[in-house]
């Protein structure tokens, strides 16, 4: 979907794609896309990778997150060397959520970018902020990022949020009248749509009980009867962001399907805190955490309760998180 707020970023992505597929070097590399969560960075990267996957010439593309890089650098040197060679050699490399890089891994990423630039390989980087504000990262890396093409994704306007929600509603078979869709789009804050997409997932569970499309009045009534999920889903998003930062994983990983210990634990703790602080039911929490079953949430809460009783350090960390979120 082409959105006005994505215009400049889309042009930059398309130029990068054409340059690589035509055997030329991208004029400015790395290409850095930055903006608040939910503004479309991942969608643009996915579209770019899809172009490479469908190209008949057999171009290669790799997408890795800051969390993936951190885990790869915790292994032995042989594994790291193989991973680094693979990342240095692919035709397109997308590095996502670089704001989560540790200083040690950031130095390796800088070396990787230098190697790719020397080999005339295209690199796309995403972050929640531009190079100048990533002050926790080494200047050596931020200067490399600033030297390429830096494009800021603007917060999504109401019309763009409405278009995204309309597509999602059709996919989930949630029928909404025009006024209901307008109202739902107006509930998004921060320029993204993640929280409202979570609300739409919750609505999908009850929409089949209504014979016709949900109008605004009915929609507001459903929300009131189920405990004001707009604010609650927004709270879940805040909890996810806070826990992800505390455990050095990305929000995407936390809400995704990874079973790695570090990601799994952070996901379970986020579910535990969300159940305590939002008042959402188990099914609605499952929906907010990527459409998971309510039994998964219940298991996570029980698992965390057991670990808190045995691990004083973890209990202290969760207590601090709870205090910051309350």
Image: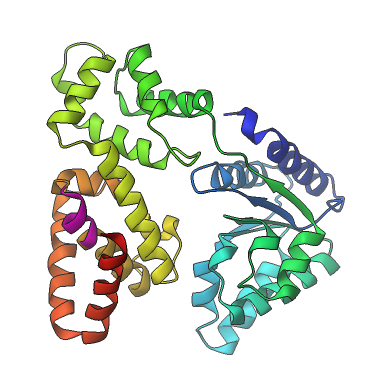
Residue 168 visible (yes or no): yes
Q: Considering only vertical position in the picture, is 317 above or below 14?
A: below
Q: Most extreme residue toward the bottom, as rendered?
A: 77
Tell me where the magenta segment starts and ends, as one range. 273-279
Most foreground residue, 7 or 158: 158
Which residue is located at x 41 percent, y 42 percent?
A: 194
Residue 257 visible (yes or no): no
Most foreground residue, 56 or 27: 27
- The spot of residue 59 in percent (x, y) is 71, 52
Relative side of 121 to 196, left or right = right
Q: Residue 276 in magenta?
A: yes
Q: Residue 175 in magenta?
A: no
Quadrant placement of the C terminus: bottom left
Which residue is located at x 50 percent, y 84 percent?
A: 75
Which residue is located at x 56 percent, y 82 percent?
A: 79
Q: Considering only vertical position in the picture, is 77 above or below 259?
A: below
């Amino acid at each position: 979907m082409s959105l006005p707020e994505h215009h400049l970023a889309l042009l930059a992505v398309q130029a990068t794609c054409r340059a690589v597929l035509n055997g030329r070097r991208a004029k400015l590399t790395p290409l850095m896309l930055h903006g608040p969560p939910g503004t479309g960075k991942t969608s643009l990267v996915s579209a770019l990778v899809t172009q490479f996957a469908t190209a008949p010439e057999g171009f290669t593309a790799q997408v890795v997150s800051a969390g993936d890089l951190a885990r790869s650098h915790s292994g032995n040197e042989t594994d790291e060397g193989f991973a680094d060679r693979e990342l240095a050699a692919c035709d397109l490399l997308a590095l996502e959520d670089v704001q989560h890089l540790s200083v040690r891994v950031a130095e390796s990423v800088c070396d990787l970018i230098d190697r790719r630039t020397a080999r005339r390989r295209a690199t796309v980087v995403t972050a929640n902020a531009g190079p100048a504000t990533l002050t926790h990262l080494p200047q050596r890396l931020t200067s490399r990022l600033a030297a390429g093409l830096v494009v800021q994704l603007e917060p999504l306007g109401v019309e763009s949020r409405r278009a995204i929600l309309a597509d999602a509603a059709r996919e989930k078979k949630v029928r909404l009248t025009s006024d209901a869709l307008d109202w739902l789009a107006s509930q998004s804050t921060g320029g993204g749509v993640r929280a409202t997409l979570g609300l739409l997932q919750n609505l999908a569970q009850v929409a089949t009980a209504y014979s016709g499309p949900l109008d605004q009045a009915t929609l507001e009534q459903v929300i009131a009867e189920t405990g004001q999920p707009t604010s609650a889903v927004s709270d879940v998003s805040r909890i996810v962001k806070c826990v992800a930062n505390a455990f050095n994983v990305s929000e995407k990983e936390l809400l995704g399907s990874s079973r790695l210990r570090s990601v799994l634990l952070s996901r379970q703790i986020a579910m535990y805190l969300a159940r305590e602080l939002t008042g959402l039911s188990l099914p609605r929490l499952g929906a907010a955490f990527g459409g998971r079953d309510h039994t998964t949430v219940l298991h996570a809460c029980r698992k965390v309760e057991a670990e808190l009783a045995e691990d004083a350090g973890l209990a202290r960390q969760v207590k601090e998180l709870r205090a910051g979120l309350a």
